[in-house]
């Protein structure tokens, strides 16, 4: 069970108190009634599925009740940081030439290839 | 006497305290503190089980949780019966019954032993190859037979009468393992004031100090030091010391699961005491002090009863006071077996010979053995043993061959070295590294905030262990915020510094020999099976494991993994680190389902939510149905009535006089703030600006994709206060949905949401006489049509308590919904019942509610809709504000697929035979004679017998349904085809006059 | 109206209840007035004055004045409990600051857990760290107890008030009772 730092409660609490709520930083268009089918599809249906850092929303539903944002590494399943809703998206992209801003201890998830060897 | 093999004066058990138990029908007396294994060994019994595949007779191999052979069934009574218990772990209690497993008719004579004779046909991969043909036989013949023959123990058939506890715990430092290393680490951490939990799987702390009587710490015997240290730790407020507690799973962020065996060792447990307790510990830091496990030697016929680990023999002697034999042979590649031999010899046991595969043992051992009168063969091998149910001899030859010598023994103890227990470290996702110098895998790269100390970290010398552990305990406590106070490093000394060790098959069993040299005892995997796997193309250790089943038994390869890996590496011609270890997974040792379930069983498996009127309804004879976690009154059968009769009567009564209904489970949300109407404008498809205080409106809520999400009546209590209702099942998700939009999309709005579902008890009174029934109970409200018309709400007093009185209807009749604070619900319900009685009105349940609303064509979101219907599809397009600039779903509704022709639409269906009641979910077609697969037009969503219409009625979603009104469609059933006519959805009072009283 | 209307009797979800040993005893809290109070930071002063206590603004903190308690549940949310059943809605009606007050007196039920093992009993199903350092007297939090949402409020070193929704109360009490029996 993960520990998740709630930016409103100021402490890490058990995952049992939280609920995941999808990708973060996807603003509902102010003129939503007027957007094209393609724009609507982009807004509502299409999501990236990155290997690495993902920006997502969580709600401390059985705690303070607030939605907040989190940066999580989909490879190690570790939370890099959490921050309040409405705050700007933090830039965690690596500087040119620098190593990716992943935690040093991240390691691949247990895919079939990782644990069972490569099927060749 | 508690067994002929007890050595007077040896061991730590008290001869005065005894316990009686039965093993396979025979009575035995044990000493308090005995395990089943030690008590049986004391009586000269080594044969404790049969192997899984070949049914070979097997004896106890170990004295701990790594035991692969001595799996037994332990029972207190018929319901309290547990299979596959390790005899080396189970403590004897007075009156216990123990049975051996995997044998028929008896342990000594087992018909399944034929498998051993036939073993050439049961080579590795046998199952995969043999049962392929004919294909159909797998499910009908092979699998059932194999299932019957496989599996070691037998599960009890009765419900488990025990209960199981669970506990979350937090600490600064969790120490896993209470040997010398764990105790020293805990002591150092505790001295700083840090909160410490120490868990050890054995009844007493001490770990290897149980057998290692040569170890001294702070001038006293190591085991005595361990008990004294445990006592001082227990006395500290900041320390929790748990024995009989196995840390079995290490999860993310130092979350460690542990199973505490609370009463399995007690003859008469207290009634309230749980059998086991699951600990879920969140530790800031973890010390892994899990020690190491001795490996057996891999040689021909190394599985006969009486052949066991050297350290196990030492444990039985030094802790339990039991010798494993009277003439004991030793076969080793490691010094630890010498100490076992010396201890046995000093206790008066004859040592037949020490056979050492090495050229030289550690310094001084050869000489010491000689001085004790023990013969030592160095650079020799044991290439065979004899004895059917107990080892009788070992055959010794020089490594590389030469003259054989057969030596009589009644026990043979072996050691090929020690495997560090890196299970917890590996489960923490740390990466192990191979140490070529010592031939073992040790903790390498750490991922979590933990440290390994002691022999699981490859530290062998006792003084070095104590220094390492003390430093780690202090360091981790400091990292957890406790730097004050320090504990001195205890002074420790081993009797002998061990050297040696080997992995893989010994001479005579490798590299090419095809003798039965067992690697994995429980799964009957021999060295030759692993070689066969490699020859057949398995090159990954994970494939070899699955092909041979090496390491897949309940002991999870604690003894066999490294041997199997070494043999595979040799066969592959690759180094051990290149071949790599299989993954360590939780649990470290088997965990009962009861422990994992904890108290989530029986009445408290899940919350059962009851309304404030539940007890009264129950007394009124209500039958209840489950709606999510809620219990809702389904119907109120009178004596002699079945459900249909009751529902028909209730339906008639509501429309002729009146009925009253418990609507308390409806979701309720109080929306308060100056922007409340603006917020509801965005959440609902309707417009709320024009709704005046005191009036209500039916609202439809969409998801952003345009599909109906929920519905309900919303009453405006004041300019800035709305009383929103939702479906019973939708209440939590609607609240979440609304909070989501409020917090993240519309945070500028001054409005707040509060769930009031459980604040209000709700009594719906419906029918022509509804007003007359409630009028005597109401104060402060004018119930006339003019003052309180359909779709209005007033705050008043009902039965003297503050109430919100709604004039609403889900039946099409004149109706009211009385909302009173929940604690008053039962009394107000009784008052309504009393007032209703003179009119002949009756209570009605959810079934009648469903029929009545269907007669009016009122939809139920989630029954008539399924998450793919738009308001137009569901026939409630009138609730969508045409002029609104925005609401959730406004854009989704314009998606091309949502506006196309031919979408499924909600319609009514009338069967040609009015007595025929359709099945909900039944499919609908235009032509019942078309070829299969037929084109399905839709399905029935609601279907009832309508007593008020005198016929069956149904609603359905049908492609292009509204254009098909008047047409005949067909509902194919397995035994017949039902013709139906498409209609509108209102079956009763089509003009709708009744609702206005 | 001919007859005077009989005033409905109140039937709490939990009957007066006492169980457990001295190390962990359970009892049903009596009726109390409760309010779900929501407001933005600029209203805290006026609302505090109206309620007669300082609404806490730090997470996990509660304020108390006699029988009245205000529990921080979220950055704009408090659970106000008045054990003397004072009319909290009336108290706030003239506060003069923007807020939402909703009467939830009957929505919740309270269970009192007392004794040296009180925290242990709650930890049988609650993942919060209830040590005195992490959760001192006066601390409160909304959290979970097994399969129910609860609010846990420490009123003394060895005393907690556990609040849950009415229909969950029998379940919460049963879970706590099982843990108390084995404490």
Image (cartoon, coloured by chain):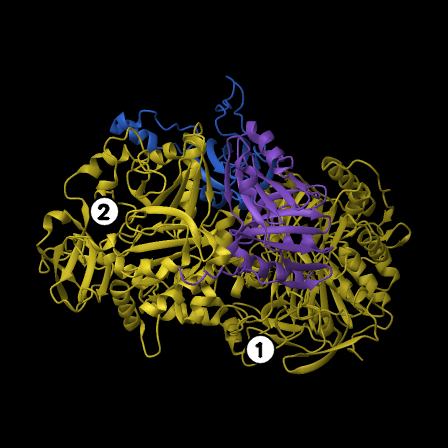
Chain colours: A blue, B yellow, C purple
- Classify mark 1: helix, strand or loop: loop
Residue B294 seen in the figure: no
- Classify mark 2: helix, strand or loop: loop
Q: Residue at x 34, y 54 (%)?
A: B816
Q: Would you identify the image quadrant in which residue B324 lies?
A: bottom right
Q: Residue at x 65, y 65 (%)?
A: B274
Residue closer to the observer: B352 or B650: B650
Left/right placement of residue B214 relative to residue B653 reads right
Q: Would you identify the image quadrant in which residue C4 lies?
A: bottom left
Q: Position of residue B764 (x, y in %)?
A: 36, 57
The residue where tag 2 is placed is B874
Residue B413 seen in the figure: yes
Q: Residue at x 58, y 80 (%)?
A: B106
Residue reaching furthest to the front:
C2
Q: Do labels 1 and 2 touch, CB within 8 Å?
A: no
Q: Position of residue B796 (x, y in %)?
A: 42, 50
Considering only vertical position in the picture, is A11 above or below B824?
A: above
Considering only vertical position in the picture, is B28 above or below A36?
A: below
Q: Position of residue A5 (x, y in %)?
A: 58, 36
Residue closer to the observer: B546 or B406: B546
Q: Chain of mark 2?
A: B
The residue where tag 1 is placed is B78
Q: Residues within 10 Å of mark 1 (few under 14, many from 20)?
A: few
Q: Residues within 10 Å of mark 2 (few under 14, many from 20)?
A: many
């Amino acid at each position: 069970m993960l520990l998740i730092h709630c930016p409103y409660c100021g402490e890490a609490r058990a995952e049992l108190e939280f609920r995941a709520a999808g990708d973060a930083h996807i603003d509902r268009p102010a003129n939503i009634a007027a957007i094209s089918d393609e724009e609507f599809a982009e807004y509502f249906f299409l999501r990236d599925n990155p290997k690495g850092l993902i920006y997502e929303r969580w709600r401390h539903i059985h705690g303070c009740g607030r939605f907040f944002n989190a940066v999580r590494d989909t490879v190690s399943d570790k939370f890099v940081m959490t921050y309040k809703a409405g705050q700007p998206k933090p830039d965690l992209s690596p500087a040119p030439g620098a190593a990716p801003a992943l935690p040093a201890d991240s390691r691949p998830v247990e895919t079939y290839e990782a644990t069972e060897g490569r099927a060749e | 006497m508690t067994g002929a093999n007890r050595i007077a004066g040896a061991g730590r058990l008290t001869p005065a305290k005894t316990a009686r138990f039965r093993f396979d029908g025979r009575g035995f007396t044990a000493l308090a503190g005995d395990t089943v294994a030690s008590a049986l060994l004391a009586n000269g019994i080594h044969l404790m089980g049969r192997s899984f595949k070949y049914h070979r007779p097997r004896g106890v191999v170990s004295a701990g949780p790594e035991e692969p052979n001595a799996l037994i069934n332990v029972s207190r009574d018929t319901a309290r019966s547990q299979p596959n218990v390790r005899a080396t772990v189970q403590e004897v209690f007075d009156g216990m019954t123990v049975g051996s497993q995997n044998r028929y008719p008896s342990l000594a004579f087992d018909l399944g032993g034929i498998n051993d004779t036939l073993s050439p046909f049961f080579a590795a991969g046998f199952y995969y190859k043999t049962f392929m043909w004919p294909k159909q036989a797998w499910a009908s013949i092979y699998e059932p037979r194999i299932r019957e023959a496989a599996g070691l123990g037998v599960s009890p058939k009765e419900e488990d009468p025990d209960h199981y506890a669970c506990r979350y715990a937090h600490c600064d430092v969790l120490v896993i393992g209470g040997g010398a290393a764990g105790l020293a680490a805990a002591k150092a951490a505790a001295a700083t004031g840090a909160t410490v939990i120490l868990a050890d799987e054995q009844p007493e702390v001490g770990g290897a100090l149980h057998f290692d009587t040569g170890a001294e710490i702070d001038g006293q015997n190591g085991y005595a030091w361990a008990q004294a240290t445990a006592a001082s730790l227990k006395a500290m407020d900041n320390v929790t010391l748990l024995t009989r507690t196995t840390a079995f799973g290490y999860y993310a962020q130092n979350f460690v699961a542990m199973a505490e065996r609370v009463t399995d060792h007690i003859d008469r447990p207290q009634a309230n005491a749980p059998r086991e307790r699951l600990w879920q510990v969140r530790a800031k830091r973890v010390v892994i002090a899990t020690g190491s496990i001795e490996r057996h030697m891999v040689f021909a016929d190394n599985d006969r009863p009486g052949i066991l680990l050297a350290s196990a023999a030492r444990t039985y002697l030094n802790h339990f006071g039991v010798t494993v034999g009277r003439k004991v042979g030793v076969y080793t590649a490691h010094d630890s077996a010498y100490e076992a031999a010396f201890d046995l010899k000093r206790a008066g046991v004859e040592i037949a010979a020490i056979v050492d595969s090495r050229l030289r043992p550690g310094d001084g051992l050869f000489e010491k053995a000689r001085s004790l009168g023990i013969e030592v063969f160095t650079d020799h091998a044991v290439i065979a043993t004899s004895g059917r149910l107990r080892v009788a001899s070992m055959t010794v030859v020089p490594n590389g061959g030469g003259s054989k010598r057969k030596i009589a023994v009644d026990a043979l103890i072996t050691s090929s070295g020690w495997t560090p227990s890196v299970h917890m470290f590996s489960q923490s996702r740390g990466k192990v590294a191979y140490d070529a110098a010592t031939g073992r895998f040790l903790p390498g790269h750490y991922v979590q905030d933990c440290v390994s100390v002691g022999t699981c970290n490859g530290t062998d010398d006792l003084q070095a262990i104590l220094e390492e552990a003390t430093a780690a305990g202090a360091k981790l406590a400091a990292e957890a915020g406790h730097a004050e106070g320090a504990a001195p490093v205890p002074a420790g000394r081993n009797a002998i510094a061990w050297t040696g060790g080997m992995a893989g098959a010994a001479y005579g069993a490798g590299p090419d020999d095809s003798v039965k040299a067992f690697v994995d005892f429980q799964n009957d995997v021999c060295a030759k099976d692993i070689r066969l796997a490699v020859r057949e193309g398995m090159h990954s250790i994970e494939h070899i494991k699955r092909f041979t089943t090496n390491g897949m038994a309940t002991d999870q390869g604690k003894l066999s993994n490294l041997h199997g890996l070494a043999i595979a590496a040799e066969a592959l011609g690759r180094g051990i680190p290149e071949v790599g270890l299989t993954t360590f997974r939780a649990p470290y040792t088997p965990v009962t389902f009861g422990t994992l379930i904890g108290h989530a069983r029986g009445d408290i498996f899940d919350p059962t939510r009851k309304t404030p009127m539940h007890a009264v309804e129950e007394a009124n004879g209500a039958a209840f149905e489950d709606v999510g976690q809620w219990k809702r009154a389904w119907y109120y059968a009178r004596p002699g009535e079945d459900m249909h009769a009751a529902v028909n009567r209730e339906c008639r009564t509501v429309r002729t006089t009146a009925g009253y209904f418990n609507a308390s489970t409806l979701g309720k949300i109080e929306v308060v703030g100056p922007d409340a109407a603006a917020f509801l404008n965005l959440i609902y498809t309707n417009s709320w600006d024009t709704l005046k205080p005191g009036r209500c409106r039916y609202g439809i809520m969409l998801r952003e994709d345009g599909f109906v999400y929920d519905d309900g009546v919303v009453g405006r209590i004041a300019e800035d206060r709305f009383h929103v209702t939702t479906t019973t099942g939708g209440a939590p998700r609607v609240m979440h949905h609304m909070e989501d939009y409020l917090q993240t999309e519309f945070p500028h709005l001054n409005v707040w949401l509060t769930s009031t579902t459980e604040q209000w008890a709700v009594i719906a009174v419906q029918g022509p006489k509804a007003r007359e029934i409630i009028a005597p109970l109401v104060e402060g409200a004018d119930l006339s049509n003019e003052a309180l018309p359909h779709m209005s709400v007033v705050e008043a007093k009902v039965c003297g308590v503050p109430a919100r009185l709604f004039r609403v209807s889900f039946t099409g009749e004149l109706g009211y919904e009385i909302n009173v604070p929940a604690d008053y619900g039962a009394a107000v319900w009784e008052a309504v019942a009393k007032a209703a009685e003179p009119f002949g009105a009756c209570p009605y349940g959810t079934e009648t509610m469903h029929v009545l609303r269907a007669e009016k064509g009122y939809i139920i979101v989630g029954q008539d809709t399924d998450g793919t219907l738009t308001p137009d599809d569901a026939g409630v397009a009138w609730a969508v504000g045409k002029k609104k600039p925005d609401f959730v779903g406004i854009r989704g509704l314009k998606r091309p697929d949502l506006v196309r022709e031919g979408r499924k639409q909600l319609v009514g269906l009338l069967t040609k035979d009015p007595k025929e009641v359709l099945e909900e979910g039944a499919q609908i077609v235009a032509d019942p004679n078309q070829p299969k697969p037929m084109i399905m037009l839709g399905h029935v969503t609601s279907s009832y017998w309508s007593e008020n219409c005198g016929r069956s009625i149904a609603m359905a979603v049908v492609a292009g349904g509204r254009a098909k009104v008047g047409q005949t469609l067909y509902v194919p059933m397995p035994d017949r085809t039902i013709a139906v006519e498409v209609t509108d959805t209102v079956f009763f009072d089509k003009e709708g006059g009744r609702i206005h009283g | 109206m001919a007859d005077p209307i009989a005033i409905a009797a109140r039937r709490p979800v939990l009957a007066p209840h006492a169980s457990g040993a001295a190390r962990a005893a359970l009892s049903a809290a009596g009726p109390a007035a409760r309010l779900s109070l929501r407001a933005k930071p600029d209203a805290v002063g006026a609302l505090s004055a109206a309620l007669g206590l300082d609404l806490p603004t730090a997470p996990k903190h509660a304020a108390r004045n006699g029988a009245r308690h205000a529990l921080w549940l979220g950055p704009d949310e408090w659970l106000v409990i008045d054990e003397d059943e004072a009319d909290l809605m009336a108290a706030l009606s003239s506060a003069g600051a923007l807020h939402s007050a909703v009467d939830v007196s009957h929505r919740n039920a309270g269970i009192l857990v007392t004794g040296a093992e009180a925290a242990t009993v709650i930890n049988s199903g609650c993942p919060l760290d209830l040590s005195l350092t992490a959760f001192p007297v006066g601390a409160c939090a909304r959290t979970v107890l097994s399969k129910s949402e609860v609010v846990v409020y420490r009123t003394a070193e060895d005393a907690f008030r556990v609040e849950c929704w009415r229909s969950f109360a029998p379940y919460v009490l049963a879970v706590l009772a099982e843990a108390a029996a084995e404490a």
